[in-house]
C-alpha cells in the first residue's frame, strides 16, 4: 500500500526563509523554515491520507527519520551517543521528567546521521581536524592563538582537554581575543585556510563571543556540492552551517551540544561520549554511471538511495517500510497495484512493508529511504 506523505516545516530560528520555498517553487516564507519531518517520530509525525498521521499506520516502529533540512544560519555544534551510551544515560536519568532541564537523553537509541546536499553548496563542520593541520591554521591567527596552540601541542588527549577548557567558562578572555584575530585573518588571508577562516568569522557574526566559534576552528570545514553526502557516526562532533539537504537518521532525539547555542551545554556528559579521533570525514559522491546512487553507511537503521530520473521508469527493490521523497522535476511512483501517483517536490510517499518493489518514473530526482541492510 502507498500513502501520500506531507508535513509542515518546523520554524527553528536557524532555518531559512527561502531554501524550502525555492525548492517547492513558492514565495519565500515570513518565518524561518528549518526542517520537514517525514517519519513517525512522536515529536512531529508526518501527515498521511485520510486525515491521519504516520504513527497511526506504523505504531511508531520506524527505525529511521527522513527530513528536509534548510540551514539559513549555523546549527549548534553537537554529538550523538552510541546505543550503549544512550541506554546507560537513559537509565541513569530515569528519575528525571522529560522536560527537566537537566535531562540529556530523550530515548535509549543512538542517532547516526547522513546528510546529502540539495543546494549547490552545503557547508558543514564534520569531525575533528588532525592537530598538526590545526596548528598550521593557527599560525595565521598569530599571538592571540598562543594559549590554544600551547594546549594543542601538549601531551595526552589534547583535543578533549582543549574542548573542555574552551567550554569551561574559564577561557572567555582568550576566546574573545582569538575570535577578533580570526576576523582579521579572514579578511587578509587567501591561502588554503581562507574558507575555514571565513566560515569561523561568519559563525562569530551569528554567535559573537561563543566558545563554539573556537571549537569550530578544531573541526574539518567541509563544503558539499549537490548530490554529495557525509555520514556522521556516533561520537563525531559536527554542525551544519548553511544549505539545503536531505537528512536521514536513526529514530532518536539524543543530542549533546558543544557550542553555538543558547541551550544548556553539559560539558562532562559531552566529553564522555565525544570521540576525539581526528581525521578527514569521507565525502560520499553521486554516481556518474547509471541513475541510482547508494550512500553506504554501516548502521542497520537506515539506507538511502538517490534516483536521477530521465524519462525511463526505474524499478527499485525495497525491503521493509520505505519512503520516496521528490526533490526535483516531475516524479511519479507506483507499487504492486501499478497505479502511478505523482509526488510533488518536497513531499513523499510511504510504502508499507508488503511492497517489495517500487517503480519511479518521470524526469527529476527522488530519494528512497528504507531500513538498513
Image: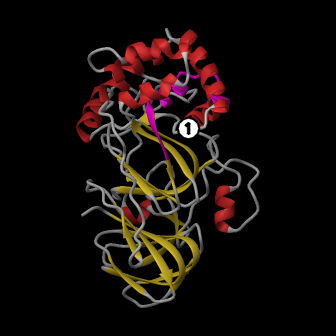
Picture residue at 45% right of the left edge, 50% below the top:
42
Range covered by the magenta-colored residues: 204-222
As for residue 220 lying within the magenta part, the answer is yes
As for residue 304 lying within the magenta part, the answer is no
Picture residue at 67% right of the left edge, 31% below the top:
187
Badge 1: few (under 14), some or many (20 or more) residues near its Cα, within 10 Å? few
Q: Is residue 209 visible?
A: no
Q: Position of residue 281 (x, y in %)?
A: 37, 45
What residue did someone put label 1 on? 191
In this rendering, is residue 169 above or below 215? above
Q: Position of residue 171 (x, y in %)?
A: 50, 11
* Helix, strand or loop under label 1: loop
In the picture, measured across the screen, residue 8 lies left or right of residue 31, that is left
In this rendering, is residue 147 above or below 18? above
Q: Position of residue 79 (x, y in %)?
A: 39, 36
Q: Which residue occupies the foreground of this view, 308 or 362?
A: 308
Number of on-image labels: 1
Is the N terminus in the top left, top right, bottom left or bottom right quadrant?
bottom left
Picture residue at 30% right of the left edge, 69% below the top:
320
Render colour scheme: secondary structure
Q: Is residue 322 visible?
A: yes
Q: Position of residue 206 (x, y in %)?
A: 66, 32
Amino acid at each position: 500500500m502507498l500513502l501520500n506523505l506531507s508535513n509542515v516545516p518546523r520554524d527553528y530560528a536557524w532555518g531559512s526563509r527561502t531554501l524550502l520555498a525555492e525548492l517547492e517553487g513558492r514565495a519565500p516564507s515570513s518565518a524561518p523554515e528549518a526542517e520537514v519531518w517525514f517519519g513517525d517520530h512522536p515529536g512531529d509525525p508526518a501527515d498521511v491520507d485520510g486525515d491521519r498521521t504516520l504513527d497511526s499506520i506504523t505504531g511508531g516502529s520506524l527505525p529511521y527519520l527522513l527530513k528536509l533540512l534548510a540551514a539559513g544560519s549555523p546549527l549548534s555544534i553537537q554529538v550523538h551517543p552510541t546505543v550503549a551510551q544512550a541506554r546507560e544515560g537513559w537509565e541513569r536519568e530515569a528519575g528525571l521528567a522529560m522536560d527537566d532541564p537537566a535531562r540529556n537523553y530523550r530515548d535509549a537509541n543512538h542517532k547516526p546521521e547522513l546528510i546529502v546536499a540539495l543546494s549547490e553548496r552545503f557547508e558543514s563542520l564534520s569531525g575533528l581536524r588532525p592537530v598538526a593541520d590545526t596548528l598550521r591554521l593557527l599560525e595565521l591567527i598569530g599571538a592571540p592563538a598562543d594559549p590554544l596552540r600551547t594546549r594543542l601541542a601538549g601531551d595526552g588527549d589534547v583535543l578533549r582537554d582543549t574542548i573542555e577548557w574552551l567550554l569551561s567558562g574559564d577561557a572567555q578572555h582568550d576566546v574573545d581575543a582569538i575570535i577578533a584575530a580570526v576576523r582579521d585573518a579572514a579578511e587578509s588571508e587567501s591561502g588554503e585556510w581562507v574558507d575555514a577562516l571565513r566560515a569561523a568569522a561568519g559563525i562569530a557574526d551569528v554567535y559573537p563571543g561563543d566558545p563554539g566559534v573556537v571549537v569550530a576552528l578544531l573541526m574539518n570545514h567541509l563544503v558539499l556540492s549537490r548530490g554529495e553526502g557525509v555520514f556522521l557516526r556516533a561520537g563525531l562532533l559536527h554542525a551544519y552551517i548553511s544549505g539545503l539537504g536531505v537528512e536521514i537518521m536513526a529514530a532518536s532525539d539524543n543530542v549533546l551540544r558543544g557550542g553555538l547555542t543558547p541551550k544548556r551545554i553539559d560539558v562532562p556528559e559531552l566529553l564522555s561520549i565525544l570521540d576525539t579521533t581526528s581525521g578527514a570525514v569521507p565525502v560520499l559522491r553521486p554516481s556518474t554511471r547509471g541513475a541510482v546512487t547508494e550512500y553506504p553507511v554501516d548502521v542497520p537503521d537506515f539506507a538511502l538511495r538517490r534516483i536521477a530520473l530521465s524519462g525511463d521508469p526505474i524499478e527499485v527493490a525495497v525491503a521493509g517500510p520505505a519512503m520516496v521523497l521528490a526533490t526535483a522535476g516531475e516524479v511519479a511512483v507506483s507499487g504492486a497495484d501499478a497505479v502511478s501517483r505523482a509526488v510533488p517536490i518536497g513531499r513523499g510517499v510511504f510504502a508499507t512493508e508488503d511492497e517489495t518493489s517500487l517503480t519511479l518514473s518521470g524526469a527529476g530526482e527522488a530519494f528512497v529511504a528504507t531500513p538498513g541492510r
